[in-house]
Image (spheres, grey):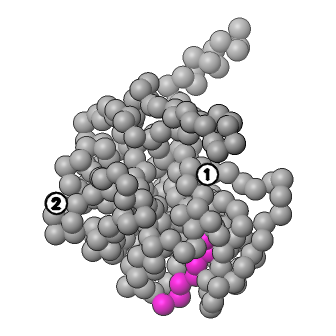
Amino acid sequence: MRILLTNDDGIFAPGLEVLERIARQFSDDIWIVAPSEEQSGAGHSLTLSSPVRLRQHGERRFSVSGTPTDSVMMALRTVMPAPPDLLLSGVNRGANLGDDVTYSGTVSAAIEGTLAGIRSIALSQVYAREGMADSVPFGAAEAWGAKVIAPLLDAPFAPRTLVNVNFPAVDAGAVKGIKAVRQGFHDYARGSVVEGTDPRGYRYFWFGLHGIEHTPGHQTDLEAIQDGYVSVTPLQLDLTHEASLGDLAGRFAR
């Protein structure tokens, strides 16, 4: 089985090292194509106004001077001799839950794989304490990663769907299990924009991701993570709201 690994935290991210150790439990045919620098929050963006550069760091290991989407496209169209059987994106440093999947470069890399017809899984490690961005503990992801992936290898994936996995912010031994749950949603009404002044006296603004209250529904990824479970959520690329389609068709048929 050929596996492509990518992420949005960059080629040298510790989460990617964790993901490689997880992937090697299933195959030795591992290819890594990831952004050269962190691309968190890049979403499903594509570099169009500047050249993308490819650098090799070793056998089957490459970095791309662009987004996670660029990395997957380069892997499939330039780097790899044949398409992979599986794409794994992560392990992201931080949660990708609820509506945040729309911002996530980690999830978007899996989306790009899905568009290419490849079985794709996004994996993220939640962390609880502030000030830990450079020392996030990936113990839960490392211990439970293979346990989550193994049942998904022969599971039926509907066309244009992917799976989003999040590991809770607890020690590996404290994880209560794995739950398949729906996507939750956040309340961004109280999200913050932090204003400051740079050393040259110019104002700047920084989006604050802390302090945002969420409103989980019953049995969502948000609740599962809060309760200490690994969350597994199937996502679909078709964003059409079917319930509105008939009404709109009728309005424009008048």
In the rendered image, the quadrant that contains the C terminus is top right
**Residue at (38%, 66%) from the top-left corner?**
135
> What's under tag 2, amino acid-wise?
Lys
The Cα–Cα distance between marks 1 and 2, rounded to whole angstroms, is: 32 Å
Quickly name the residue at label 1: 42
Quickly name the residue at label 2: 176
- Does 196 sit above or below residue 92? above
Q: Is residue 147 visible?
A: no
**Residue at (70%, 14%) from the top-left corner?**
252
Question: Mark 1 falls on what kind of element?
Answer: loop
Report the label total.
2
- Please tell me how crowded label 2 is: few (under 14), some (14-19), or many (20+) other residues with Cα within 10 Å: some
N-terminal label among 1 and 2: 1
Coordinates of residue 170 in the picture (x, y in percent)? 22, 60
Any magenta on residue 31? yes
> What's under tag 1, amino acid-wise?
Ala
Q: Quadrant of residue 81?
A: bottom right
Coordinates of residue 169 in the picture (x, y in percent)? 27, 57
Left or right of 124 on screen, residue 12: right
Question: Mark 2 falls on what kind of element?
Answer: loop
Coordinates of residue 134 in the picture (x, y in percent)? 43, 64
The segment highlighted magenta reads 28-34
Q: Residue furthest top?
A: 254
Q: Quadrant of residue 26?
A: bottom left
